[in-house]
Image (cartoon, helix red, strand yellow):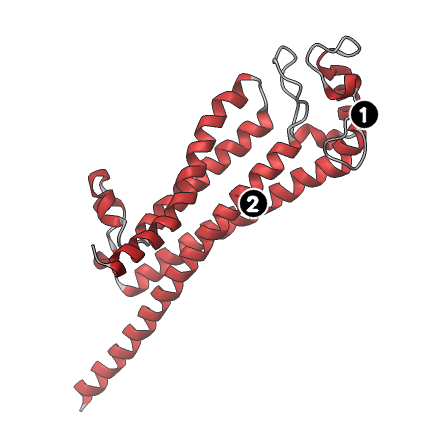
Amino acid sequence: MDRANAQALAGDALKIIPSCVWCIVCLVAIPSYASIDWHGAVFTAIFSMCLCILAARDAIYLSPTMKPLAAPFGYRLALDDEEMLSALQNERKALTKFRFAAAFLFTSAFLAVFFLATFYAVIAPAAGGASAGNRSKMPCDGECEGCIEDPDCHEWSEVLLRKHPVVGICPPPRRSADTDVTFSCSADGYWMLVTTFIAAVWLALVTRQLRMAAARVAQSAVNSIGTEMQAGV
């Protein structure tokens, strides 16, 4: 393999690795979160995994050096169909991908902001102040597991939920869970920040594909006009 091919392979790998790694992290995290009924975290992990699968699929599609590696998995049936479509059909296909990626990016960014705003504006002050790690206002200073004053910080969580129903978007785990955690908004917010980055990379890739497809449509139109003019002559 010459240097140019090696650089191309490395560049294409960088497009795919973030999605694949984050997808694996999500897959590993889901059973752990589900085991303690941390529903908000389970939702963000499933959402992120779906996004990563779609992003990885398009990253492979748009990476010439990676497409042959996907041959054993049937990429020709699912991916390698550009030659069977017209320039206009390819542009419409790219536009559909762009809309999907843009929708996922917007949703990811919105959820990240919403979860983090809920944590820093509601949960953190109730726990102990502006600092995310300060739990001085929580029973047993936030060491909820085995807390005699308020086992699992259940009453504290219920009071906060009644005063601020918005925290129900990231509910605490079940009482029997062996953990000190309560509401998952902080974890969910930072999780969605990573997912937003993956979505941004995905959108950048499909935006490039859309521009290339549009250029082919324009070139096809020019060629068609040229052919008609020659036929008229």
182 or 135: nearer the eye? 135
Q: Is residue 45 above or below residue 176?
A: below
Q: Is residue 88 above or below residue 75?
A: below
Give neighbour class at mark 1: few <14, some 14-19, many 20+ (Cα, 10 Å): few
Amino acid type, residue under disc 2 in the picture:
Thr
Mark found first going from the N terminus, 2 or 1: 2
Give how far across and how far down residue 89 sits, in percent: 31, 60
Amino acid type, residue under disc 1 in the picture:
Ser
Residue at the (48%, 21%) spot, across then down: 31
Locate the C terminus by quadrant: bottom left
Residue 163 horizontal side relative to residue 34, left or right: right
Locate the N terminus by quadrant: bottom left
Give how far across and how far down residue 154 sits, in percent: 73, 15
Q: Is residue 5 above or below residue 166?
A: below
Residue 41 horizontal side relative to residue 210, left or right: right
Q: Secondary structure at mark 1?
A: loop
Residue at the (76%, 38%) spot, across then down: 121
Residue tagged by mark 1? Answer: 136
Indicate which label's residue lies in the foreground, 2 or 1: 1
Determine the image quadrant of residue 192: top right
Give neighbour class at mark 2: few <14, some 14-19, many 20+ (Cα, 10 Å): some
Q: Secondary structure at mark 2?
A: helix
Residue at the (32%, 48%) spot, across then down: 60
Determine the image quadrant of residue 84: bottom left
Residue 55 horizontal side relative to residue 217, left or right: right
Residue at the (49%, 32%) spot, across then down: 46
Residue 194 horizontal side relative to residue 73, left or right: right
Residue tagged by mark 2? Answer: 107
Give how far across and how far down residue 161 sits, in percent: 75, 25
